[in-house]
Amino acid sequence: VYLDRSFFEDLARRFGAPGEFARAYVIAHEVGHHVQKELGITEKMARQRARAGEAQSNALSVLVELQADCFAGVWGHFARQRNLLEPGDVESGLQAAAAIGDDRLQRQSRGQVSPESFTHGSSAQRVRWFRAGLDSGDVRQCNTFATARP
């Protein structure tokens, strides 16, 4: 798992999502990508993306990212169950998920939003999938590929 620690500074300063749990959400999301690699999802999606056009490739990338958000939520579920969270932690994680949605990032950097170019999902999608894992604690609820509306 690779983490660019400077992203944590950006998360707090540029994106308005400070706090330990916001950082923990990012780490859990990246661990989610490791889980995807171990399950063969990363390789399968890479093959599909290589055969797809740009728009479809981006859409597949969004599904991969949203699943990692859901996996991060599953981790949060069990951290909460074990009383490892402090008041405000869940809100901090949800705020971080919303802060790094493609729509918000594009609006900040370009002044407009182009959903067809999303690679990580909108703020609402990221919050929805993080919450799905957080509320259920069940990785089976993280199958973003089987849903009609990510």
Image: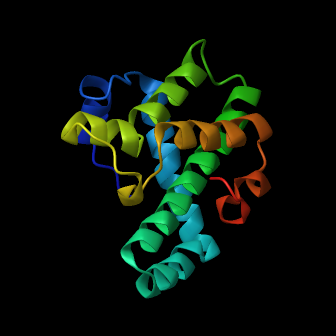
Front residue of 92 and 28:
92
Using the image, determine if residue 5 lies above or below residue 38.
above
Whether residue 19 sits left or right of residue 106 in the image: it is: right
Identify which residue is drawn at 41% across, 52% down: 115
Could you say where residue 89 lies in the image, as x and y percent from the top left? 56, 20
Could you say where residue 77 lies in the image, as x and y percent from the top left? 71, 35
Q: For the N terminus, give its image quadrant.
A: bottom left
Q: How many marks?
A: 0
Could you say where residue 80 lies in the image, as x and y percent from the top left? 70, 27
Q: Quadrant of residue 76?
A: top right
Whether residue 141 sits left or right of residue 76 in the image: it is: right
Using the image, determine if residue 49 lies above or below residue 60.
below
Front residue of 137 and 103:
103
Front residue of 14 and 58:
58
Q: Quadrant of residue 136?
A: top right
Q: Quadrant of residue 68?
A: bottom right
Using the image, determine if residue 137 lies above or below residue 96.
below
Identify which residue is drawn at 72% across, 64% down: 146
What is the basis of the colouring in this image?
Answer: rainbow
Could you say where residue 21 lies in the image, as x and y percent from the top left? 49, 27
Identify which residue is drawn at 76% across, 42% down: 137
Identify which residue is drawn at 42% across, 84% down: 50
